[in-house]
Image (spheres, rainbow, N blue to C red):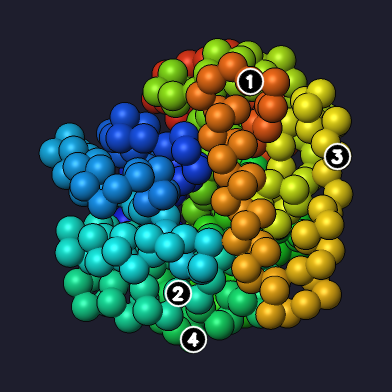
């Protein structure tokens, strides 16, 4: 089943939940453009703010939207956020960085669908067994947290071995990219990087300028910000701090007990740096983006960017 059939939307496209960036305006515009919008629960600091955002989206569009939920120890708000998403019956939840077992179990009780981020077949089979409604296949072309496998290898492998829809995430900028992954067997796409350059995205002028000025050759992988592979723009600051494992990371990899706690520290510290970079001038410029940045040439309304994927 294609994503548009599964969700009851016009196009098999999700505007991906982007940490710190996705907001109510972007979600509503995506939904009203025939796709589906989504946002990370962590983009709202309090439960009150999260509820307000969901109610506002529900009042402005009748089309389905989704909320990304980080389900490991790096998110101390996960339990409360899940309670809210279930109570307000959001159309679908996208899980990341942990076991989605409880999310799937509780979502089924209220008719909420669950899509799980996966980067390999082993984990995809696990979430299918738990009852996931689909997987977000995060490939090596994704912006932000990415996987190790190309879409040409990952999608057919998952499609062959799974009975649930496979949604491809990474490397999408034009309709031909959408058509390509659909031809590989994907049910739809999750698209992030090109929507960073939407007029609705609340980014600093420096970040916006960087999205236009830099290209694919300027995208590098770093593990310094979250403890996992993260694609960022290779700014002078990123060059100065390097992209290799820190002492804490190396220590974590040698000690299984310490690993989860040290990765949590790295994640929290790194996300604070990224937040400061995104919204105000700072010399500590860590800007997330994927290789699709090559196709960003200006800041445009989200609905115009959507046309690149659908016409």
Residue 44: x %, y % from top left: 35, 44
Residue at 69% in and 27% down: 284
Q: Tell me how far mark 2 sits from mark 3, CA to CA.
A: 33 Å
Q: Tell me how far mark 3 sits from mark 1, CA to CA.
A: 18 Å
Query: Secondary structure under badge 3?
Result: loop
> What numbered label is drawn on residue 127?
none
Residue at 85% in and 39% down: 242
Q: Earlier in the sequence, mark 3 or mark 4?
A: 4
Residue 294: x %, y % from top left: 72, 26
Residue on which the image places disc 3: 242
Residue at 36% in and 35% down: 23
Q: Tell me how far mark 2 sits from mark 1, CA to CA.
A: 36 Å
- Picture mark count: 4
Vertically, is 48 above or below 164? above
Pointer 3 with pointer 1, Cβ within 8 A: no
Q: Give the crowd class for mark 2: few <14, some 14-19, many >=20 residues within 10 Å.
A: many
Question: Among all residues in the image, which is located at the extreme left?
Answer: 59
Q: Is residue 24 left or right of residue 287?
A: left
């Amino acid at each position: 089943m294609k994503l548009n059939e599964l969700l009851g939307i016009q196009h098999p496209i999700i505007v991906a939940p982007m940490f710190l960036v996705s907001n109510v305006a972007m979600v509503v515009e995506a939904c009203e453009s025939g796709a589906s919008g989504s946002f990370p629960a962590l983009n709202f600091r309090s439960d009150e703010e999260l509820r307000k955002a969901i109610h506002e989206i529900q009042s402005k569009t009748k089309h389905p939207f989704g909320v990304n939920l980080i389900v490991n120890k790096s998110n101390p708000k996960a339990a409360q956020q899940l309670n809210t998403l279930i109570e307000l019956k959001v159309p679908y939840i996208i899980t990341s960085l942990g076991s989605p077992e409880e999310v799937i179990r509780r979502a089924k009780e209220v008719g909420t669908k669950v899509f799980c981020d996966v980067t390999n077949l082993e984990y995809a089979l696990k979430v299918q067994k738990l009852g996931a409604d689909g997987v977000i296949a995060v490939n090596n072309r994704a912006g932000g947290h990415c996987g190790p496998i190309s879409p040409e290898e990952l999608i057919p492998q998952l499609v062959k071995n799974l009975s649930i829809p496979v949604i491809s995430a990474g490397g999408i900028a034009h309709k031909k990219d959408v058509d390509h992954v659909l031809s590989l067997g994907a049910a739809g796409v999750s698209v992030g990087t090109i929507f960073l350059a939407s007029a609705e995205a609340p980014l600093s002028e420096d970040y916006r300028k960087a999205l236009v000025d830099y290209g694919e050759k300027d995208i590098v992988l770093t593990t310094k910000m979250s403890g996992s592979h993260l694609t960022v723009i290779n700014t002078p600051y990123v060059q100065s701090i390097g992209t290799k494992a820190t002492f804490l990371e190396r220590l974590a990899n040698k000690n299984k007990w310490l690993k989860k706690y040290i990765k949590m520290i790295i994640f929290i510290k790194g996300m604070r740096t990224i937040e400061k970079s995104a919204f105000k001038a700072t010399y500590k410029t860590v800007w997330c983006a994927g290789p699709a940045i090559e196709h960003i040439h200006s800041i445009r309304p989200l609905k115009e960017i959507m046309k690149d994927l659908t016409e």
